[in-house]
Image (cartoon, rainbow, N blue to C red):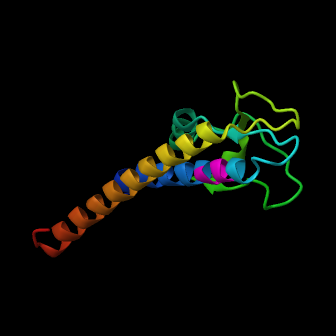
């Protein structure tokens, strides 16, 4: 049985895990903007977060050769299973599909969402601490 504290904080922790993982993917795309034959990847944030929060099994397991290859856990979920190649990007002559404008915009938007989740989580923790200590924030 989950406690009230878990019910309050777990959704925010899940959002932070998914957001942080997505930030890693977007950073890897930006870092590989000039790498021949690199294909830009991303995760569908809302779908991934919903799956993580529901505790459903991942749709597929991605086989990796190393533990450092986009494998992370969030609430028992392997987020690497949600990684998809980005669609709609033009592929250059070198086979690279990274669109720097799109990547930078996605990176910034994801950063703002992550910061908002951190701020909201901090507010929740401050509220809980003030309730426990009996003081006003």
Q: Is residue 112 left or right of residue 39?
A: left
Of residue 111 and residue 80, the one placed in the foreground of this image is 111
35 horizontally vs 130: left or right: right
Q: How many marks?
A: 0
Q: Residue at x 64, y 47 (%)?
A: 26
Where residue 97 sits, quadrant-wise, is: top right
- Residue 82 placed where, x, y %? 68, 39
Say above or below: 123 vs 97: below
Seen as rendered, the residue at the extreme bottom is: 133
The spot of residue 24 in percent (x, y) is 64, 54
* Residue 1 at least partly seen: no
Q: Is residue 11 left or right of residue 46?
A: left
Question: x%, y% of residue 43?
Answer: 63, 38
Residue at the spot 56% in from the left edge and 54% down from the top edge: 20
**Relative side of 16 to 25, left or right:** left
Task: Name the image quarter holding residue 52.
Answer: top right
Answer whether residue 82 is magenta in the image.
no
Identify the residue shown where x is 75% and y is 47%. 33
Residue located at (32% from left, 54% from top): 120
Query: Considering only vertical position in the picture, is 84 above or below 2?
Result: above
Overall secondary structure of the magenta section: helix
For the record, the magenta segment spans 23-27
**In the figure, residue 38 lies in which quadrant?**
top right
Q: Residue 24 in magenta?
A: yes
x and y percent of residue 44 in the render?
A: 59, 34
């Amino acid at each position: 049985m989950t406690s009230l504290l878990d019910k309050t904080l777990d959704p925010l922790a899940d959002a932070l895990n998914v957001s942080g993982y997505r930030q890693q993917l977007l950073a890897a795309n930006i870092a590989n903007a000039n790498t021949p034959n690199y294909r830009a990847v991303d995760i569908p944030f809302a779908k991934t977060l919903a799956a993580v929060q529901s505790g459903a099994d991942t749709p597929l397991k991605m086989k990796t050769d190393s533990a450092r290859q986009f494998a992370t856990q969030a609430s028992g979920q392997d987020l690497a299973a949600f990684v998809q190649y980005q669609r709609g990007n033009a592929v250059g002559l070198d086979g690279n599909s990274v669109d720097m404008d799109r990547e930078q915009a996605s990176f910034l938007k994801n950063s703002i969402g992550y910061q908002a989740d951190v701020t909201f989580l901090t507010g929740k923790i401050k509220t809980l601490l003030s309730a426990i200590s009996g003081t006003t924030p």
